[in-house]
Amino acid sequence: MTILGGIGFTAPWLLIALAALPILWLILRAVPPAPIRRRFPGVALLLGLKDDESVSDRTPWWLLLLRMLAVAAIILGLAGPVLNPQEDQAQGNGPLLIVLDGTWAGATRWAEQMQAVEAQLSRAARANRTVAVLALTRPEEPLFQAADVWRSRLAGFAPEPWQPSPADVARATAIIDQMAGFDTLWFSDALDYEGRDEMLETLQAQGDVEVYQTAANVLAISPATYADSVINLQVARAAPGPAREVTIQAEGRDPAGNARILATANGSFAEGETLGTAELSLPAEMRGRITGFVIAGQRSAGAVTLVDDALRRREVALIGGRGDREALQLLSPLHYIEQALAPTADLIDGSIADVLPANPDVIVLADIATLSEAEAAPLTEWIENGGMLVRFAGPRIAASDVSRIDEDPLMPVRLRAGGRSVGGAMSWGEPKSLAPFRDTSPFFGLPVPDDVTVTAQVVAQPDPTLADRVIASLSDGTPLVTRKSVGQGQIVLFHVTATAEWSTLPLSGLFVQMMERLAVSSAAAQPDAGDLSGTTWTPLRIMDGYGTLSDAGTLPGVDGADLVSAPAGPALRPGIYANADRRLARNVFTADSRLIPASWPADVPLRGLAVPPEQPVAGWLLSLAILLLLADVVASLALSGRLLGRRGTTVIGALVLAICLPHGPADAQSAEVDAFALAATVEVSLAHVITGDAEVDEIAAAGLQGLSDVLFFRTSVEPAPPTAVNLETDELAFFPILYWPITPNQPRPSAEAYSKLNTYLRSGGMILFDTRDADIAGLSGTSQNGRKLQDLAALLDIPPLEPLPADHVLTRTFYLLQDFPGRYNSRDVWVEASPPDAEQIEGMPFRNLNDGVTPVVIGGNDWAAAWAVRSDGAPLLPIGRGYAGERQRELANRFGVNLIMHVLTGNYKSDQVHVPALLDRLGQ
Amino acid sequence: MTDPIAPGDYTPATLRTEGEEEAARLPALLARAEHLAGAVLLGAHGRRRAGVGDDFWQYRPAQIGDSRRMIDHRRSAMGDHEFVREREWQIAQSVMLWVDQGASMRFSSDSRLPQKSDRVRLLGLALAILLLRGGERVGLTGTRLPPRRGNPQLLRLAEVFCQDDKADYSPPEHRAMIPHARAVFISDFMGDMSGVKLALTKAADRGVRGVLYHVLDPSEEAFPFRGRTIFESVGGTLRHETLKANDLRDRYLERLATRKAELQSLCAVTGWRYGLHHTDASAQAALLWLYAALDARAGVAA
């Protein structure tokens, strides 16, 4: 590749063709443009005229320039230009090995790293080099393949949440040793690890080595510790630098259980320091919900530290017997257990009734024999919900009859009367020591000190269940600690006192460890390997290299000792591990981990990742050439007058129209719909259905106008002018009421219109059907309109109907009415049937009827005709005769007012039945 | 005038409608007969003297020899003398049209301009309507449609005007010209001049006076062409190729001016009038000019 002015060319000799451009210019200039054919009647006058010179008009310079540019673009494109050519890199031609550290330290910049790798792969592909990729965190024997193959497999590489172990490095070295000579590109994560130097030497023996690593500093966070009611956080960085602040986010669950950031703290690195600290003080309740700490802006497993029970302080309620010897503090039954638990648990004092509402994790009963029924019942319930009751024996229990004959619900075993004492002055034998813990015991693995002796204890009755319940026993096999599960909780009984009276157990360190194992207390610090030896921990959630937690699935459990001390690897993935009730977080970056920046010998070239990838631009140039040539076609046509011929104009016009047309009407339509919605909703508007019969529609509109006027004058309803509604196209939801005059010839609405109508009826709309024939509407179906109504309403979702009862709310929403005349005076108006159980309550004038608005009112009185007014406000149609007719019109108007009031206020007037009762209550 | 109908879309009906519209804007045209004495056919053409006609001319005292039934009793009853009502002597004038139907007329340089043929047909028919309304007899030169009176003639004219001629440049029809009638020739006069010369000489021989109306498209007057161009006549019979059309402009305009001068001198010799009209100008103005030219007294015509 040749570099010219920052652009590389794969075929630079083609650029010589650019020299031919001026010649082309001259040639193109000399060729005349095609003649234009013109119809011209004046040609008769032209006949015989000769041209002065034989040279024709020249092609315009801009058209020439366009063509020149197109040709130049083609030449440049074929010359294979490449942007950002990486000319400063040595370009070998043998096989190429790309070594990835692939650790969490590079996870934050992983995308960048992969881009750099991809750039190298495309470069290798151009040079026809075979490539192999080796990730040190997962060394697998790589195959030298075409670079494009590796490029497609690149997405499969992900950072691992551990550093290459010496075993990994050894294996990688072995693999490299087997391969023939090659050059190496090493994408380092900027952290040192064991065996890196040897690895480098091995690689250098094979060929050139170049190292790529990001300039960004690697940050990590140590596991949080809790001391003096402050959470201490320590952050580390690989390379010392200027003073810097990092934000540490405490992640956890809010009370609703959603993951969120609970708090943030600022950790600061002093200048030149690699360690920084932060402190966070949180209430215990919030502290208990923290699941981990994250360095903001970092996306690596090292920048995440998970939190286990270490931050969690258990609440332990200590309840002793009545202290008749209070003065003797060391003899207090709770003294030793207080001392054992105080550093790691929050202690609560009080009676059982007092502490249960606080829902402590553990309740310790020291030598309390009997519990009253009022105490035992809530206590049992608390245990069944997951509480842990720890009881210690003592003289009182030994003396009582608790759990003697029958097993007490709050005791794990039955007890023999009196207990026993061994090794005392009055007995034979030596004080008993503890037997080693069995592997089924939660204490399995704890060392048994020799100096723990038991001189007195309460003794369990042999029972079939006893063997299962013993979790610690004396050397002679007598149970020392028994346990039973109750519901989700458990009851543990120490068969000795919590004081040093009966045994030396409370004095020993074993006592504290037993408390920890029982999860009575949580470990104050990260447990060491010895503490956990013999336990098996199953992973709950594991972390990937980016620090994202995921379900552990069926990963095998790990040994407790390994969990703490072994380095993380494929067999020990960082994450949350569980053993019975205890949880332990295994973090990538542990308290004793250090970040050591990788240092490279001077002879190894070291590069940053921010290398812009090479970009071939030939395709773009050739596309540009095609576009220019297309423009040339258009320009040439325009120049010779052929672009916009009569037909051309039509075609272009049609094209433009086709592009524009779908938008225009759609917009217009939506604007129309909007205008309709606006008009219908700014004010209340009465609406009538367009029947298609012009006269009926006119009368309906005039009728609603008359009713609107009446409403305007007499009530606080001030409707807008009525709206004519087309069931097929218009939205119905805006109208409180639809007046639907029935004509024999109106078309049935479409299925969509019916579904709209049903939605309208269900959502509180009302339709006033008017058969306009004074017939009993729709019941006998004797009239033409009645039959039409039946036909129309068959598909509507109409509830059962009944003739309007005398106590219906329609009779009193505004006026007190018993008749509902329109142009005709028929009593038959049908509304939604009242519920069958509606009863008139004694002393109430009305029944308590349906709660909503009746969805339909059906009648045949031709109300619109009675309401109808001319534009000057005078009645449109005569009603009845003389004064009686006017009276009937007035009643029709009143019915209209009542109807609209009913629609707008619902059963508000129905509630008036309660007024006497309300007044009565007010004392009037 | 704007054309509500696209050029070339005239049917007899629409052409007549438009002609009627055009004619409605002018008072009835009363062409003057140049030769009162030579008039052979009577028509409703006021001669400013008593004679045979329908319109009132004057009352004169009854003289001996007047028939009694000639006495106008209404006027006579106003006084002691008896009056006779005289009517104006009216005659009809024959006007012969020749409207160029050649292919060269079917041209317009711009879609907004009417074709020349549309314009000349419109003008011809409008003129015919005016003349017919004035009671004149209107027809075409040649034997196809001799001058007649009345509205049916209008329909025949419109029908003839809607027929295109295939020839590129058609010479004026000069046969069967009625002596002492008037004639109107409307054309672009792009074709051979000999035909025009022959027609006009023949007309002058027969005492026919008239108007030579020269209608041109604006592009024919401006010659706005550039570059390598092949000019073709509308019928496709003539073609001329040039490498630089803009160089031809001056010489073309010179030739056009010569053509105009030739026509004008021909008119001057034969006693005709020469008029020039461009299709981008208003048809109304053209009709007015034609009206005035036809209405001009004998001898005044240039």
Image (spheres, coloured by chain):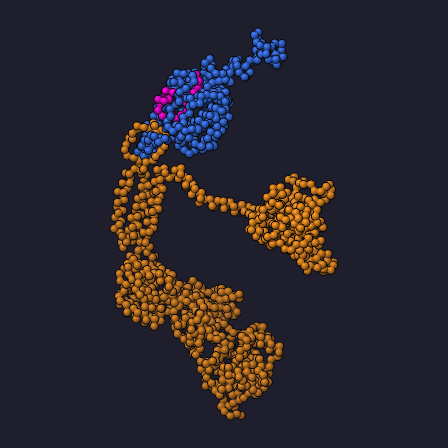
B75 and A116: which is toward the camera: B75
Residue A352 in sight here: yes
Q: Say whether residue B236 is left or right of residue A329.
A: left
Q: What hue does chain B carry in this figure? A: blue
B149 and A302: which is toward the camera: B149
Q: Say whether residue A849 is left or right of residue B70.
A: right
In the depicted structure, whether residue B137 falls above or below residue A120: above
Is residue A884 within the magenta segment? no
In the depicted structure, whether residue A821 falls above or below residue A340: above
The quadrant in which the N terminus of chain A is found is bottom left
**Furthest residue in direction top, as rendered:** B64
Name the spot of residue A205 as percent of width and height, x first.
26, 67
User: Which residue corresponds to the image point at 34% horizontal and 27% vertical from the top-left?
Assistant: A45
Q: Quadrant of residue A189?
A: bottom left
Q: Magenta span covers which residues?
A: B180-199
A584 and A846: which is toward the camera: A846
Name the spot of residue A878 as percent of width and height, x first.
69, 41
User: Which residue corresponds to the image point at 39% horizontal and 37% vertical from the top-left?
Assistant: A645
Name the spot of residue A108 as percent of width and height, x first.
40, 63
Q: Say whether residue A45 is left or right of residue B52.
A: left
Q: What hue does chain A carry in this figure? A: orange
Q: Quadrant of residue B217?
A: top left
